[in-house]
Image (tube, helix red, strand yellow):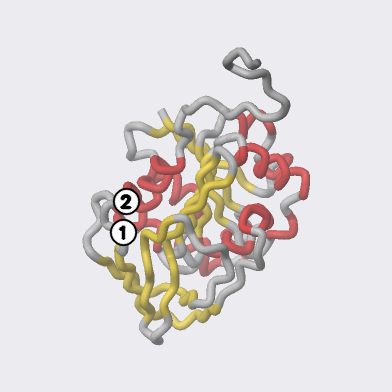
Amino acid sequence: MIRVTVWNEFKHERLHEEVRSVYPDGLHRAIAAGLEQEQDMSVRTATLPEPECGLTREVLNGTDVLIWWGHMAHEEVSDEVVERVYARVLDGMGLVVLHSGHFSKIFKKLMGTTCDLKWREANEKERIWVVDPAHPIAAGLPEYFELKPEEMYGEHFDVPAPDELVLVSWFEGGEVFRSGCTWKRGQGKIFYFRPGHETYPTYYHPLVRRVIANGVRWAAPSGAAKPVRGNHQPLEQLG
């Protein structure tokens, strides 16, 4: 079983009726509900209001893949928790960053860039194209699928060139965006997936749920032996 933790700052839903009407139990519960249908995953949730942001050492040590949704409270995540998550990613924990999590402390630390972009809220259509159909994250997807309404994110997305580009979005207003990107950091794998504005029912969409589940499987630890570093004795006799 892949042990998944879905993290959400859980502020919009408590403060704004518009968001609460779409996600009455929180975005984390909607995302988790999609993954709970997968037979190879065990799912838990964690939120910002919990002690240590819900991401204690015990929780992270019991997590194979962490899913991150944040927007209005990036700065409220303590640097201690960010360092803890960062260390776990380097040690092999997978990380799936959703939508406005691109501005989270942990994603910016892993990318080493501003992670800035264009954006617009105009209830427009997003067409998501699969540009790497052989990639495991694209399993079960059609050539493209559409979401409406969604928030626009546009290039230039200030991130390092992805190791792999799986999905690209086109928006009704004309912009495009690298909406499904992967990177590796240390032993860990990172997948960024763009859709998911808090006032739209995106996380109930079956193909969005499919992408997230595929991303979890891709990001799960490989089980490979950890590399040994530092001064090392020769394996063969020297001299």
Is residue 25 at all visible to an observer of this figure? no
Report the side of 8 relative to 36 (left or right): right
- Residue 238 position in % (x across, y down): 64, 16
Residue 191 picture location, percent across and down = 48, 52
Q: Quadrant of the C terminus?
A: top right
Query: In terms of secondary structure, where does tag 1 sit?
Result: loop
| Picture quadrant where residue 217 is located | top left
Do the CB atoms of the residues marked 1 and 2 lie less than 8 Å apart? yes
Q: Identify the residue at the far front of this view.
A: 239
Left or right: residue 6 versus residue 58 is left
Image quarter of the N terminus: top left
**What amino acid type should be assigned to the residue bearing mark 1?**
Asp
Q: Write the residue at 35% across / 77% down.
A: 125
Crowding at dot 1, Cα within 10 Å, few <14 / some 14-19 / many 20+, comes out as some
Q: Is residue 55 visible?
A: yes
Q: Decide which of 200, 68 is in the foreground and name it.
A: 68
Left or right: 27, with 70 as reference point: left
Residue at x-position 72% and y-position 44%: 83
Instruction: Give the structural element (helix, strand or loop) at label 2.
Output: loop
Q: Position of residue 167 (x, y in %)?
A: 37, 63
> Vertically, is 21 above or below 125?
above
Q: Quadrant of residue 228?
A: top right
Which is nearer the eye, 201 or 118? 118
Q: Residue 166's spot in the image, x, y percent? A: 37, 59
| Residue pointed to by mark 1 | 132
- Tell me the kind of residue under disc 2: His
Query: Residue 32: which quarter of the image?
Result: top left
Q: Which residue is at 77% across, 44% downward?
A: 80
Q: Residue at x 73, y 40 (%)?
A: 51
Tally of marks: 2
Look at mark 2 in the image and give the residue it sits on: 135
